Image (cartoon, helix red, strand yellow):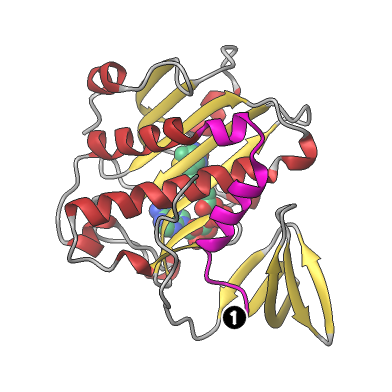
């Protein structure tokens, strides 16, 4: 169970989070954050979301009290054209926090099976462990970073190919410790975003994907899908798919990998 007092007392001061709101049950932490007048550095945690949101109108379903569902509301002074960096930053540092957790608490588990799937899913092999929903205003400054991480949930509907840390490790994880580990990971590295070190962020993110060269079905929308090869992941956030003898870049859509086989990822590259 989340202990909001413990989180408030242990949260690193200053760089990222100024206040912590815990609510037992709300429709969506992202929607709650959007309606807050307070702008900068708010962490909103839900015990349960009755209408958790995914991207493109999809749903995020998470069992009561078992998982982490939270949002960070934060302003970043970066050009709108670079807004994919916020996605890259948070996806990468969620991924690296999970790797740190697994290596420290469960060294027997193969953390190299973790990877980021475009645009911002954290996968363990071919199953989804964590999803991020990042919403921004056109001014390019105000962001809501919503994170759903499956921690102690053991049963998921078959159709969604989900996994949790409990299913990976066999052990129950303390939600407070894990949340603090993630917030510390963001806080420790937030200077990369603040100092516009975009090349570094992009390389970290790109190196933690395992997609380039893989064959996929690319779902553009309900009526359009293509089979092709993933050629590149661009700095602007788009993915380049080679299909029908041409390369086309897409900013939204979904990748379904065909015959995924995990290969070793670059784990925790050094940040200099
Ligand atoms: C995402 O969307 O993966 C973004 C999820 C973000 C959730 C957080 S929780 C805190 C904050 N407040 C919110 O309201 N949302 C954010 P997308 O890539 O569209 O994936 C959605 C799809 O993932 C669904 O259509 C299902 O197929 C699948 N899915 C739903 N719940 C899942 C779960 N718990 N684990 C794995 N997959 C799930």
Q: Quadrant of the N terminus?
A: top left
Reading the image, the residue beneath label 1 is 214
Residue 200 among magenta residues: yes
Res. 43 in view: yes
Stretch of the chain drawn in magenta: 190-213
Q: Residue furthest front?
A: 272
Residue at 52% over, 71% down: 210
How many residues crowd around disc 1 within 10 Å: few (fewer than 14), some, or many (20 or more)?
some
Residue at 31% over, 44% down: 67
Q: Is residue 71 left or right of residue 31?
A: left
Place of residue 4 in the rendered image (x, y in percent of width and height, measured from the top left): 28, 21
Q: Quadrant of residue 21?
A: top left
Q: Quadrant of residue 204?
A: bottom right
Vertical relation: 231 (above or below) 249: below
Res. 49 in view: no
Q: Is residue 118 left or right of residue 19?
A: right
Residue at 36% over, 22% down: 12
| Secondary structure at numbered mark 1 | loop
Q: Residue furthest left?
A: 171
Residue at 76% over, 80% down: 242
Q: How many marks?
A: 1
Q: Residue furthest right?
A: 246
Place of residue 104 in the rendered image (x, y in percent of width and height, measured from the top left): 21, 51
Q: Is residue 3 left or right of residue 210?
A: left
- Asked whether mark 1 and ligand 1 are closer than 8 Å, the reply comes as no
Q: Quadrant of residue 24?
A: top left
Residue 245 among magenta residues: no
Q: Is residue 172 left or right of residue 42?
A: left
Place of residue 42 in the rendered image (x, y in percent of width and height, measured from the top left): 48, 20
Vertical relation: 26 (above or below) 158: above
Vertical relation: 60 (above or below) 266: above
Place of residue 64 in the rendered image (x, y in percent of width and height, measured from the top left): 29, 41
């Amino acid at each position: 169970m989340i202990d909001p007092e413990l989180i408030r007392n242990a949260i690193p001061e200053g760089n990222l989070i100024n206040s912590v709101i815990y609510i037992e049950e709300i429709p969506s932490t992202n929607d709650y954050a959007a309606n807050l007048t307070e702008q900068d550095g708010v962490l909103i945690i839900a015990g349960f979301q009755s209408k958790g949101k995914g991207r493109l109108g999809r749903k995020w379903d998470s069992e009561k009290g078992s998982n982490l569902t939270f949002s960070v509301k934060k302003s970043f002074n970066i050009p709108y054209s670079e807004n994919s960096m916020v996605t890259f930053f948070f996806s990468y540092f969620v991924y690296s926090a999970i790797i740190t957790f697994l290596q420290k608490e469960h060294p027997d588990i193969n953390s190299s099976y973790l990877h980021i799937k475009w645009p911002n899913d954290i996968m363990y092999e071919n199953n989804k462990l964590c999803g991020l929903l990042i919403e921004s205003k056109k001014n390019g400054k105000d962001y809501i970073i919503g994170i759903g991480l499956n921690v102690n949930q053991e049963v998921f509907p078959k159709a969604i190919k989900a996994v949790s840390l409990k299913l990976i490790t066999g052990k129950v994880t303390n939600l407070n410790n894990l949340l603090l580990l993630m917030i510390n990971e963001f806080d420790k590295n937030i200077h990369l975003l603040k100092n516009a070190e975009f090349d570094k962020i992009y390389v970290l993110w790109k190196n933690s994907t395992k997609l380039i060269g893989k064959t996929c079905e690319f779902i553009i929308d309900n009526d359009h899908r293509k089979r092709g090869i993933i050629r590149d992941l661009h700095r602007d956030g788009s993915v380049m798919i080679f299909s029908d003898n041409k390369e086309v870049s897409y900013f939204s859509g979904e990748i379904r990998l065909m015959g995924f086989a995990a290969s070793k990822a670059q784990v925790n590259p050094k940040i200099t």
